[in-house]
Amino acid sequence: MQRAFASGLALLAAPLAAAGGANPLGEVISLMDELAAKVTKEGEVEAKAFGEYMEWCDDASKNAKFSIEDATKQKAELEARISGYSSDIEVAGSKIEELAKTIGTSESDVKDATLVREKEAADFAASEKELMETVDALGRAIGILEKEMAKNP
């Protein structure tokens, strides 16, 4: 539309330029053409910059989308691991309780067995002492009998 206007002004300015040298309308048209060229050039530069910006935005959007997808997958994997570890913790906890009960029972059994062994050791010591005294007495009796038999043949 601007070019059509500029072309129309150029047609009107042609007779005036032929009549008297420097035509002010021609200068206006020339300035308008220069301004239009400058605006077009700036528009092209801005369009190129906008295109690059849009390309960057698209790349950033794709990267963010991939990052979100990766993070979502990683989150699911980590939640699965946490579930597995939670069940392992429960199993280990129940084993610990079971072993603690076993240890308690074993300690009680050890105490009972120790008491029995101590009693048996005391009984053995008493029996051994009695047997030793009996053996000693028998030894003395045999010695006395041998002396008496030697006197009375």
Image (tube, rainbow, N blue to C red):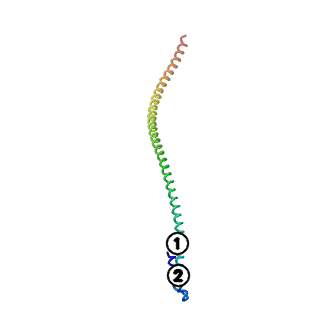
Q: Position of residue 43 (x, y in %)?
A: 52, 72
Residue 11 - label: 2
**What residue did someone put label 1 on?**
43
Categorize mark 1 by other alpha carbons within 10 Å: few (<14), some (14-19), many (20+).
Answer: few
Categorize mark 2 by other alpha carbons within 10 Å: few (<14), some (14-19), many (20+).
Answer: few
Mark 1 residue element? helix
The residue under the point 47% across, 49% down is: 79
Which badge, 2 or 1, comes first in the chain's sequence? 2
> Which residue ends up furthest to the bottom in the rendered image?
20
Task: Please say if 96 is above or below 122.
Answer: below
> In the image, 94: left or right of 27?
left
Q: Amino acid at mark 2?
A: Leu
Of 87 and 100, nearer the camera is 87
Q: Amino acid at mark 1?
A: Gly
Q: Position of residue 50 (x, y in %)?
A: 52, 67
Task: Measure the C-alpha gap from mark 2 to mark 1.
Answer: 28 Å
The residue under the point 46% across, 43% down is: 87
